[in-house]
Amino acid sequence: MQLFSYLEKYDYEQVVFCHDEASGLKAIIAIHDTTLGPALGGCRMWTYQSEDEAILDALRLARGMTYKAAAAGLNLGGGKTVVIGNPRTDKSEAMFRALGRYIQSLNGRYITAEDVGTNVQDMDMIHMETDYVTGVSQAYGSSGNPSPMTAYGVFRGIQATANVALGSPDLAGRTVAVQGLGSVGYSLAEQLRAAGANLIVTDINEDQLRRAASELGARVVAPAEIFDVECDIFAPCALGAVINDDTVERLRCKAVAGSANNQLAEERHGDRLHERGILYAPDYVINAGGLINVADELEGYNADRARKKVEGIYDIMLEIYNIAEREGIPTYRAADHMAEARIEQMRRVRGTFVRNEKSALHR
Ligand code: NAD
């Protein structure tokens, strides 16, 4: 790949290639932008088919984190680590400690966390070498499982979405179709039910479906049917790319608002939702509760304070819908604009400070 052309195109700051022969570590730390603060982003371990694929994944995910943190109002930038290897067979203490030393060498420009293929134990090993890690064992003051906070943020985002798409944030009597009843989806379904919503649910796990039917009075449909049901809000909480050529014309809802990452197969599917008058809650904003929660660890974790910040997803969503309305653009673009505007503003503020400091030196 033309690495530097890519870095130039999307304005990346730094890429670190980490190699440790003794432990077999092969990792890439990508730092996209630290204008707002240190780059925070998880450490993914995966059996990549090629080195190019691993590099591209690190770069793409790091940039995504810049937007996510900026839109969530956090003073953090975007970064990501990918470790090349099989998370089932290739892990060792030596490998994660070697990675920890690389992270330490960045002096806080990058802070890592759990991601696909890594877990709390891995973060504890990284923590032996550096403090620039979140999501370590709760004994060290970590925030624990992020899913309940993610679900709470999605619930708040759905209330904001209902306010705009349905004229009121009150979900009593509204119908929400939830795809995927995993860690986030089930907790979300419970909160929706408690708010008086009627639920239509699907999953590939029969046990979860039975549980939702008996505990939450949910109507169960087959996985392929969830796109066709008439509802107020469709909440994708399972897979990515669920809004695609096949499904976008089938949806019979007023809004799409759920936790899944990368819900739009392509940007044009966001344009199509806009044309169809279906309000789309940008995924990386509505699902930022977990990130907001883990970021609170950097100030000494306080669950109440974190929850209060996650609650603010309601106002952030309203702001995005306002921008979309004002500029006549789809909401996924409005979210990007909002994130970019915040970064640009802070870049200018910082620039002013640097200029003032320099001129003070010359006085
Ligand atoms: P999970 O693995 O706990 O749950 C996913 C659920 O979806 C499972 O119950 C699974 O059986 C179901 N599922 C899989 N394929 C399906 C299909 N074809 N149709 C219907 N159901 C299907 O994952 P999770 O942690 O709840 O995360 C859900 C989504 O939210 C993912 O896209 C994830 O990336 C995203 N997300 C999660 C968090 C978090 O804090 N956990 C944060 C941000 C984003």
Image: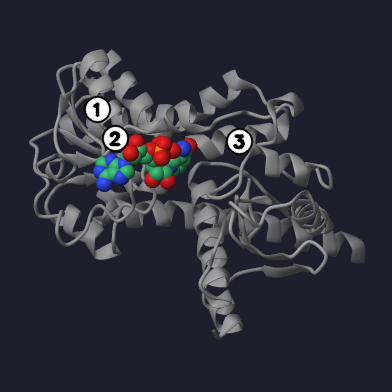
Alpha carbon separation for disc pair 1 and 2 = 7 Å
Alpha carbon separation for disc pair 3 and 1 = 30 Å
Label 3 or label 1, whichever lies nearer to me, is: 1
Specify the quadrant of the image occupied by residue 257.
top left
Label 2: state its secondary structure: loop
Q: Position of residue 190 (x, y in %)?
A: 32, 19
In this rendering, does residue 288 appear at all? Answer: no
Residue in the picture at 69% in, 26% down: 138
Q: Is residue 215 above or below residue 251?
A: above
Inspect the image, locate mark 3, and give the three-letter code of the amino acid beneath it.
Val
Label 1: state its secondary structure: helix
Task: State yes or no: discs 1 and 2 in contact (Cβ < 8 Å).
Answer: yes
Label 3: state its secondary structure: helix
Residue in the picture at 14% in, 59% down: 246
Q: Is residue 336 above or below residue 256?
A: below
Q: Which residue is mark 3?
A: 294
Is residue 356 toward the left or the right of residue 41 in the image?
right
Q: Position of residue 131 (x, y in %)?
A: 80, 42
Q: Is residue 128 above or below residue 208?
A: below
Inspect the image, locate mark 1, and give the three-letter code of the amino acid beneath it.
Leu
Q: In the image, is the residue at mark 2 within 8 Å of ligand 1 by its beta carbon? A: yes
Nearest the eye: 276 or 182: 182
Inspect the image, locate mark 2, and give the three-letter code of the amino acid beneath it.
Asn
In this rendering, does residue 76 appear at all? Answer: yes
Specify the quadrant of the image occupied by residue 265.
bottom left
Quadrant assignment for the N terminus: bottom right
Is residue 47 toward the left or the right of residue 250 in the image?
right
Alpha carbon separation for disc pair 3 and 2 = 28 Å
Residue in the picture at 59% in, 81% down: 3
Q: Which residue is mark 1?
A: 209
